Amino acid sequence: MSPRILLLRHGQIRANLEQRWHGSTDSPLTWTGRLQARRTNQHLASQPRLAAIYTSPLQRCRHTSHLATQHSKLAPEVVPGLAEMSVGDWEGRNFRELNEQENMITRLNADLRWTPPAGESLSEVAERMQASLIRIASRHTADETVLVVSHGAAMSIALAQLLHNDPRNWMDYHFSNCGLTELHITEPARLGRFNDCAHLAPFG
């Protein structure tokens, strides 16, 4: 049996508003992003007690994990494998531009080992995200709930790998800022509520 893993995407950053890919670029939360994280804290305080908190090393996740778990005395543990997918030299560019000028999504899906210049491939992200989540799950019992704070693309790729054994399904999963998703890493993996943003209204 697997613990109940709550996947939480970080709060809003400016690049989200501008529809730019920041990947491994370190970006602070906006005012709205901080408010989203605080609302998440209010929600989590009414839920089963967290056994542990894990976060990507990027500041938008670390800050979100801090604000979203102020009700808890637990210290978040940084897990490098939970970081966002890097698109290397293309970071900071608009999503539409990356697809129209570079054909990025099609190229990523056509060859799982293909990488943007100085970036990561789908298979690389799938492997490190899956390994990180399995390692986290192995540290906890089935009656425990753990919080994992990560990123939209990285978590989409992780779900595609865990649920379909194919990271090319990543476009089927969209995570909103501070949306909550319930995952059980059983055999096979099971998805509970997905991208629940009810606690964020009207900022979700």
Image: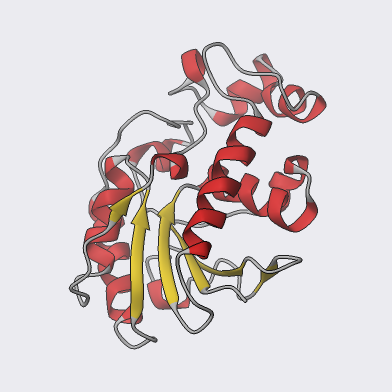
x and y percent of residue 112 in the render? 74, 27
Image quarter hosting the N terminus: bottom right
When the figure is inspected, residue 168 is found, relative to residue 201, above or below; the finding is: above
Say if residue 201 shows up in the picture. no
Residue at (37, 66) in percent of width and height: 203
x and y percent of residue 202 in the render? 39, 71
When the figure is inspected, residue 9 is found, relative to residue 144, above or below; the finding is: above
When the figure is inspected, residue 11 is found, relative to residue 13, above or below; the finding is: below
Quadrant position of residue 193: bottom right
103 sits to left or right of 130 = right
Residue at (74, 67) in percent of width and height: 187
x and y percent of residue 75 in the render? 21, 62
x and y percent of residue 95 in the render? 57, 30
54 sits to left or right of 195 = left
Quadrant position of residue 182: bottom right
88 sits to left or right of 36 = right
57 sits to left or right of 9 = left
Residue at (22, 75) in percent of width and height: 72
Tell which of 93 and 175 is nearer to you. 175
Tell which of 11 and 188 is nearer to you. 188
Colour scheme in use: secondary structure
Say if residue 28 shows up in the picture. yes
Quadrant position of residue 204: bottom left
Residue at (45, 45) in percent of width and height: 82
Tell which of 48 and 41 is nearer to you. 48
